[in-house]
Amino acid sequence: MLTVLQKLSKATKVEELTLEEHLQEMRFYGKPRVSLMSNGWYSCIEMNTNTTGTTFEVKSDFDHPTPTLAAKQCHERILNALKELTK
């Protein structure tokens, strides 16, 4: 399993990825989801943790016009959270 720093160094430019590529990349961090809500798309991920009884969730905003934009925002937030945690 890759360490957080190895994952961050492996990450590609998020804005250039397709929906499938976002989901494939996000699966390394946990269980990603993309959902159609009443007014648009939403994405979230239950992040993997190594501590029993803990959860860590990252979410996009609601009402994105496409599933790709929702996944992109969630993916960016994952990478930003991991950068902050590794400082």
Image: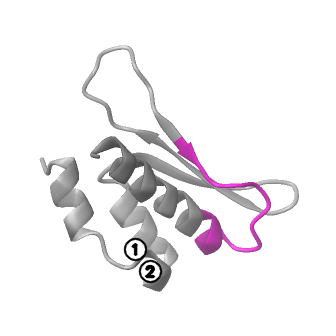
Q: Is residue 64 above or below residue 16?
A: above
What number is the disc on residue 21? 1
Q: State left or right for residue 65 relative to residue 45.
A: right
Query: Label 2, on which residue?
Result: 17
Number of marks present in the image shown? 2
Nearest the camera: 60 or 41?
60
From what the image shows, is residue 72 above or below residue 78?
below
* Residue 1 falls inside the magenta stretch: no
Residue at image x 51%, y 37%? Answer: 57
Q: Quadrant of residue 23?
A: bottom left
Pointers 1 and 2 in contact (C-beta within 8 Å): yes
Q: Residue furthest bottom?
A: 16
Is 20 drawn above or below residue 6 in the view shown?
Answer: below
- The residue at the far right in this view is 39
Cα–Cα gap, marks 1 and 2: 6 Å
Q: Which residues are magenta?
A: 58-70
Task: Indicate yes or no whether the magenta region holds residue 68.
Answer: yes
Q: How is the image coloured?
A: one colour
Badge 2 density bin: few <14, some 14–19, many ≥20, Cα 10 Å: some
Horizontally, residue 14 falls left or right of residue 87, namely right
- Identity of the amino acid at label 1? Glu
Between 14 and 45, the one nearer to me in the picture: 14
Residue lying at the far left of the rendered structure: 1
Where's residue 28, x and y in %? 29, 53
| Residue 39 image position (x, y, % from top left) | 87, 60
- Of residue 39 and residue 15, the one placed in the foreground of this image is 15
Whole-percent x, y for residue 16 in the image: 45, 85
